[in-house]
Image (cartoon, rainbow, N blue to C red):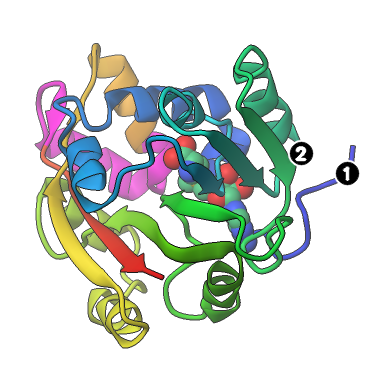
Amino acid sequence: MTGPAAGAVPSPNIWHHTATYELENLAADPDGRLWSTLQSITSWQGRDVLDLGCGSGFHLPRFAETARSVVGVEPHPDLVALARRRTRRLGNVSVQQGVAQAIPLPDASVDVVHVRWAYFFGPGGEPGLAELDRVVRRGGTALVIDNDATRSTFGRWFQQGYPGIDAAAVERFWSLHGWARSSVDMGWRFSSRDDLEAVVRIEFAREVADAVLAEHQGLEVDYAVNVWSKRF
Ligand SMILES: C[S@@+](CC[C@H](N)C(=O)[O-])C[C@H]1O[C@@H](n2cnc3c(N)ncnc32)[C@H](O)[C@@H]1O
């Protein structure tokens, strides 16, 4: 087996714990606030969508319900295979191996780009942003979703787990490149405590996971995210 495409940023959660990562996606946004925000920023009905860093393709079917076409791009070959399997009955979806720094699509070929939990964007991600300038048509929109480390229970956990991530620098990066922020209280809601604990353990080192699980009861977590968006 060949490894992930050159330029891929290691993503141990989904690369090594794919089934548990699926539980994480299932628990996220239980009241649809994140999807509502995305839809309020732009419509993808009848348009061509790119899901960049699509992982195992969890979000592709949702876009495919109304989009004209959906392309998933993902560097890890095993995840490309899973995303293709997930969408094999959908006539308007394709999945390609590739990275944000060299998107395997022609110039001006997509209207809406969705990028969710993308460690490859943020400070240092300029080559990927240049690729968005190339592939997005005039009038198109890109939507990047990431953690808001400045608020919510999850934000506090995230700061504890990843103290090197500078929320102010992330904000400066997006603002300098002309992106706008929408804050969303997305939330996590699990169907069992075992699932919640398993997901926390793929997101954080053992000491941090032990500490946050000891202090947090129940099946829900207050979890704030940022949607960074740009019109082209
Ligand atoms: C945390 S996962 C999120 C997957 C998916 N967006 C989701 O919400 O289920 C991050 C994904 O980004 C991919 N990735 C890593 N480096 C990348 C790059 N340079 N360009 C595009 N995707 C990349 C990883 O392989 C992984 O599948």
CA neighbours of label 2 inside 10 A, class few (<14), some (14 to 19), many (20+): some
Q: How many marks?
A: 2
Q: Nearer the viewer, residue 113 or 52?
A: 113
What's the distance in space between the residues labelled 2 and 1, CA to CA?
A: 7 Å
Q: Position of residue 152 (x, y in %)?
A: 10, 51
Quadrant (top left/top right/bottom left/bottom right) for the C terminus: bottom left
Identify residue type, mark 1. Answer: Thr
In the figure, 48 relative to 139: above or below?
A: above
Residue at 90 percent of width and 37 percent of height: 1
In the figure, 48 relative to 196: above or below?
A: below
Can residue 11 be spotted in the picture? no
Q: Seen in the image, is 138 located left or right of residue 36?
A: right
The magenta stretch is 201-221
Residues under numbered marks 2 and 1 in contact, where contact means CB atoms less than 8 Å apart: yes
Magenta: predominant secondary structure element?
A: helix
Classify residue 172 by image quadrant: bottom left
Q: Secondary structure at mark 2?
A: helix
Identify residue type, mark 2. Answer: Pro
Q: Position of residue 41 (x, y in %)?
A: 23, 53
Q: Nearer the viewer, residue 20 or 132?
A: 132
Q: Seen in the image, is 38 located left or right of residue 120?
A: left
In the figure, 22 relative to 154: above or below?
A: above
Q: Which residue is mark 1?
A: 2
Q: Is residue 202 magenta?
A: yes
Q: Seen in the image, is 222 located left or right of residue 19?
A: left
Q: Which residue is mark 2?
A: 77
Classify residue 62 by image quadrant: top left
